[in-house]
Image: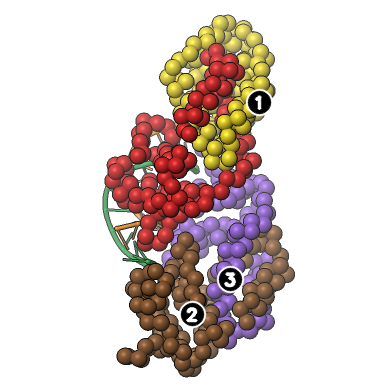
Chain colours: A brown, B purple, C red, D yellow, E green, F orange
Amino acid sequence: MINLDFKSDTPIYEQIIEQIKYHVMKGNLEAGTIIPSVRKMALELSITPGTVAKAYQELERQGIIETIRGKGTFIALKIEKKPDEEKVEQISKEFQSKIIELKMMGYDEEHIVELIRNLYREMS
Amino acid sequence: MINLDFKSDTPIYEQIIEQIKYHVMKGNLEAGTIIPSVRKMALELSITPGTVAKAYQELERQGIIETIRGKGTFIALKIEKKPDEEKVEQISKEFQSKIIELKMMGYDEEHIVELIRNLYREMS
Amino acid sequence: MINLDFKSDTPIYEQIIEQIKYHVMKGNLEAGTIIPSVRKMALELSITPGTVAKAYQELERQGIIETIRGKGTFIALKIEKKPDEEKVEQISKEFQSKIIELKMMGYDEEHIVELIRNLYREMS
Amino acid sequence: MINLDFKSDTPIYEQIIEQIKYHVMKGNLEAGTIIPSVRKMALELSITPGTVAKAYQELERQGIIETIRGKGTFIALKIEKKPDEEKVEQISKEFQSKIIELKMMGYDEEHIVELIRNLYREMS
DNA sequence: GTGGTCTAGACCACA
DNA sequence: GTGGTCTAGACCACG
């Protein structure tokens, strides 16, 4: 369910966060679903528990999951969709540098938009 | 001409690379133009020359600039636009995770496309 | 395993690159093998870690090694053999000037070919 | 008669040395021929006289040219062909690292020998 | 003056 | 523990 790329330069714990978010968004993980414990997940992924814990902590902070003591960790019942301007600002900056790269490789506006649309639809 | 964000988590030398690429692309820096020496740039930005050198070396490796021994560093005469599938693949992955973030904040396809278009046009 | 010539005019970090490539090619270093950490290697060679890091980074850029965050550095699983005309062109130029030197010392075609053959076989 | 590549990583003065040697070897420059003064050569090549002087000095040290005060600089009458083991040793090392590069790109012994033969014959 | 290399040491994020 | 980044300062070859 989760695929890690150890060679990638995005940290393992971020990859976990992204992929859980992805599954939540696609509906693979519905509200209330229990997710594996830190230890189980660590075993499955052959990584150290600390890394999983870090991912879960961040997911909880973002309100994506909820931990109930003695019961386990669950997908949050109501996940708020709040704009968060700061984050959009930051994402924009990151988009910008990627767009520069694409432009330097000859991509024009429509090529890029098409790429984005395809990516968006892949995950719907 | 170059603005550094020391609080950012993208390294200084990468910020330099991005911004020089940006200026080259916008036409602010034409082919053959000399760019400030490693030391001058370091002074201007209040950073150490080594950091500027690292940025310049990477830019040279990418064919954006050319250095002439004892003379200085110049914008390359012909900058190749080559597709480079691997890089597009990698950028796509990074786009994907950003799109997930935006979707979770309630952005739909058209919102995101609009954001991209604005970013693209800003740098034309 | 690695021998540095501090008197040589080829930089330390290039010597490291060359010798690791050499060992990979001879099969002394198989795919997946871990290589000494930046710090250990630096200690062994009595040089500063930064120099080793520079060598490792360049090797990674060339796809010879792969680094896994917090784990260490490994010989890449699949090392592509791609022709790269530009590089061959550059090597040819360098060969050319060396051949001139040898010719001026009286070496004829067969002498040089023999020298090359011996060098090639030494590293098989 | 002399073509400089300012972007190359081999120094200008070495390029001059190599090319003069090349012309001597091919017979374009016969023994006793006068070659341009330091200043003239510097003007022709649009470089600073110091660089030409350095090249001439080294060529004189190697016995390729001779300077006669008040007359000019000439191709030496008798150019000794002496083996010079040290130099061969050094060239071998440089060959070796180039051969490693070629091998890593898939070149086998015969490919390399063929490349060498072609280069040799080009300059005969 | 230029860039290239190296040192010695620091801080950081990641696993 | 790992590698990545940055600093401050040195020396060098080149032009």
Letter of the chain that mark 1 sits on in the rendering: D
Front one among B106 and A24: A24
Q: SS at mark 1?
A: helix
User: Which of C26 and A89 lies nearest the eye of the viewer?
Assistant: C26
Quarter of the image where one finds residue B81: bottom right
Q: Residues within 10 Å of mark 1 (few under 14, many from 20)?
A: some
> At 37% from the left edge and 78% from the top edge, which residue is drawn?
A40
Q: Amino acid at mark 1?
A: Asn
Contact check, label 3 and label 2, Cβ < 8 Å: no
**Could you tell me how far apart the alpha carbons at marks 3 and 2 are, in whole angstroms?**
17 Å
Query: Is residue A40 in view from this perspective?
Result: yes
User: Residue drawn 46% across and 89% down?
Assistant: A33
Q: In the rendering, which numbered label is found on residue D118?
A: 1
Disc 3 marks which amino acid? Phe
Which of D52 and A78 lies nearest the eye of the viewer? A78
Residue at image position (54%, 84%) is A28
- Name the residue beneath numbered marker 3: B95
Q: Position of residue C87 (x, y in %)?
A: 59, 40
Give me the C-alpha separation between circle 1 and circle 3.
Answer: 48 Å
Contact between labelled residues 2 and 1, with CB atoms less than 8 Å apart = no
Answer whether labels 1 and 3 touch (C-beta < 8 Å): no
Inspect the image, locate mark 2, and give the three-letter code of the amino acid beneath it: Ile
Label of residue C16 in the image: none
Tell me where residue B70 appears, x and y as whole percent: 51, 37
Q: Is residue E4 above or below residue C106?
A: below
Q: Of tags 1 and 3, which is closer to the observer?
A: 1
